[in-house]
Image: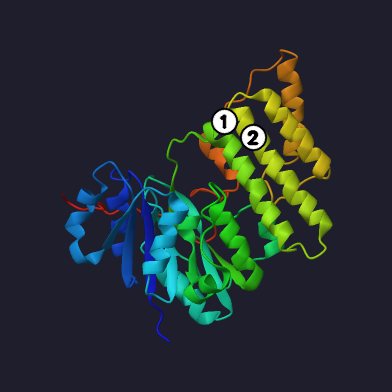
Amino acid sequence: MKSTVSVIVPAYNAARYVAEAVESVLAQTHPPAEVLIVDDGSADDTEERLRPYGGRVRYIYQQNQGVASARNRGLREARGNLIAFLDADDVWHPEKLRWQLMAFAQRPELGAVSTQRFDWPGTGYPELRPADPLASMTLISWPKLVVRNHLDTSAIVVRSGVLEAVGPFDTQLQGPEDFDLWLRIAEVTTFGHLNLPLTGYRNSPGSVSKQADRMIRDKYKMLRKLDGRSAWGGRRLLRRKAYSFANYSGFLAFREAGRHGAAMRRLLRSFAWYPFPYSGTDTPASFPRTKGLALALLRWAGLRKSPSRTSRHAAEHLGHPHMPPVGSDVSGVARTLVPQSITASH
């Protein structure tokens, strides 16, 4: 069967960036069969920004119901046998779909394929010079994924049959709704990850600190869903580690919000759930909780000011992935200039 890709782009007040996202899709060397823009009740001129594309995109409007609902609307409308997700403020490298479709063709057991990311905007797209990128593809197992989300939503392509089997995004979750779906996918199929920076991730200023309570609450709700369907399969220590990391994420978020008492409570709960060191795949830093505890004690002793954290740093530990930025040691990658025109003329 020929592979046909449906691209789903949820948009909410995304007029500033959505044309750039669409341009990156239309510039793919292997173009998709359709591009669905689901406007989740925007109050800005998102629709007007999309009019120049005419029939090249399908514009779908709905009342504001949240990003999970918008993606699910796109899933109901999609006709392709592969589904690709792209957030309205992110972009794709022109070769992204081509490499992912090659992975599906050469590894038919794969149910989903993700990629590395690069910071966007930057000085340009990464120039790809891989000898054999598929040979360096890694497989992300459910036990590896359940502690921390290593995946970017905008990087993922999934077989539509897999999504039909596991169900859509859970609209009762706000924050970890994507993580929840990736875990359900990883329970039933193989998740491949291309070690190539093909997804441009925009570090948009956010208010993660204001969302900390909701994010932690829904992360716990997601983990309890795993408890309810006995997904752990007797792996009790892994379960404790996952709950521990959820509390560590809460520590980071509350610390950023300046709620140091709540942060300390989350950190202590994290140790109570899992007192052992995290592995390098869980967090790039060594002994982060021990260091966090020491810094908190120094702050309370008046010897150190509170650390400044970006919203992106906290968001990554709340369930979003951490990938090495372009310029780090990524095999087969160099830099090239961005095409002069990447946005539609209006």
Mark 1 and mark 2 in contact? Answer it, CB < 8 Å: yes
Q: Can the viewer see residue 78?
A: yes
Considering depth in this image, is 172 or 326 the residue closer to the camera? 172
In three-dimensional space, the C-alpha distance between marks 1 and 2, rounded to whole angstroms, equals 9 Å
Q: Earlier in the sequence, mark 1 or mark 2?
A: 2
Nearer to us of marks 1 and 2 is 2
> Which amino acid type corresponds to the residue marked 2 in the rendered image?
Leu
Image-quadrant location for residue 313: top right
Q: Nearer the viewer, residue 1 or 97?
A: 1
Please tell me which residue is depicted at 20% across the width and 66% down the height of the picture: 55
SS of the residue at dot 1?
loop
Look at mark 1 in the image and give the residue it sits on: 309
Q: Residue at x 43, y 58 (%)?
A: 71
Q: Which mark is residue 252?
A: 2
Quick check: 206 left or right of 226? left
The image position of residue 187, as x and y in percent, is: 66, 68
Q: Residue at 59% of width from left, 29% of height from top?
A: 256
Note whether residue 134 is visible: no
